[in-house]
Amino acid sequence: MQKARTITSPVKGEGSLKAAQSARPFVHVLADSSAKLSGICSILERQFAVAGERLDAEAKLSQVPFAIVVRADLRDTVAIAAIKKRTPKLAKATKRIFLVEHSSHASVSQAYALGATLVLPGTINKLKLLAALAEPASASSSGPSRPENAVETAATAITSMFTAVTLGGPLNVDGAKDAGRQIADRITEHGLSEWLTAVRRHHEGTYQHCLLVTGVAIDFGLSLGVGRADLERLYTAAMFHDIGKARIPLAILDKPGRLDADERAMIETHPAAGYEFLKDHEQITPEILDAVRHHHEFLDGSGYPDALAGESINDIVRILTISDIFAALIEHRPYRPLMPRSEAYNILCGMTGKLEKALVTSFKQVALTR
């Protein structure tokens, strides 16, 4: 490994750096190699006062920067641990921009879980990076008027859930509920279509699905006029419904084509796996546990994992199941075109005997007009 070092650019010395900061915004750069560090600093140094350090160096960020730019491989647990050590100082920066080399949903969501306010995946785009740093602070703030912020709050909560399952960390139930509450506020103010667009713009795969299901379930609940307590139960169930997928290999979750029989069987273990993980958590109510375990059950008994039928399936599960199927149909998949909402609704209508007919009829306005 190369010798760890700290870079200060374009000026040398603490006094000079402070003078530069008075004229130009101060940006701190973190990277997992000297080459990456130098590359980012060279892009920024004409417009900003720049300081940088390798992630394997001792943390020396003494002043609060206007922005922090992180370039690292977020599949590397050492890099993740080094960023986490700096979290208290990172949190003070107005902007925290992560340049993620691998654009999988896992890396993108990991960046948001580490505190990113913006993630730029893939090859570095100099113009995009400079534009992101030049935007007024209000454009990337966490205020309530930006649907993207509710998206990222929810994505961070989902990432935290998956991390709790895979690494054995604490489960942040309050964070998931707060994310659901923010989604409900956004949809109440801006409608479902805007939420779907915001989610598709930022996420793919399992995380996109969880965010879409939560949004659809919330809008369905709002259209049905459910009370606040029931709406909270519904969006909490939606946030947690696929937590068992954290036990499924990413190669299967993110497979860019249809699953074979063995892979499908593996996927079908996720409701029971989620239930087993959550069942002893004191903040998870029986209604949420029931929804996590049974959101793939059908009224005719053809679902899984327990082949429940008829009255054995409660109302929250019935609502969540319709929302789950609809979201799966309209989400982006690399192997097929985006399905129109009208076509997805027609598929629901064709599932005679599996879904509650009255609920499917009520869902029409959510699917087509809300």
Image (cartoon, grey):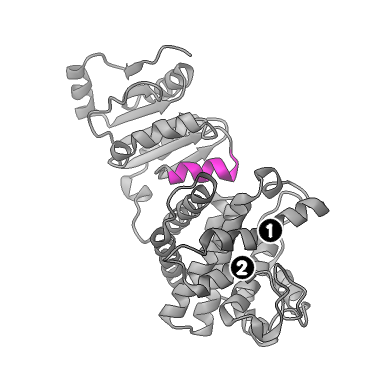
Q: Which mark is residue 29?
A: none
Label 1 secondary element: loop
- Estimate the x, y position of residue 358 in percent, counting from the top left: 66, 87
> Is residue 218 visible to us here?
no
The amino acid at mark 1 is Thr
Asked whether, in this view, residue 141 is left or right of residue 270, the answer is left
| Residue occupying image coordinates x 72% and y 46% | 255
Question: Residue 4: horizontal and vertical position, in percent?
Answer: 39, 15
Q: Residue 188 at x, y = what percent?
A: 44, 73
Residue closest to the eye, 60 or 204: 60
Indicate whether 238 appears above or below 137. below
The CA span between labels 2 and 1 is 10 Å
- Name the main secondary structure of what is drawn in magenta: helix
Q: Which residue is mark 2?
A: 293
Q: Quadrant of the C terminus?
A: bottom right
Q: In this picture, is 144 found above or below 320?
A: above
Is 146 or 89 nearer to us in this picture?
89
Q: What residue occupies the far right of the structure in this picture?
A: 261
Membership of 227 in magenta stretch: no
Write down the region rendered in magenta.
103-113
Residue 275 seen by the camera: yes
Q: Amino acid at mark 2?
A: Arg
Q: In x, y percent, where is residue 83?
A: 40, 34
Left or right: 356, with 61 as reference point = right
In the image: residue 114, left or right of residue 257:
left
- For label 1, the residue is 269
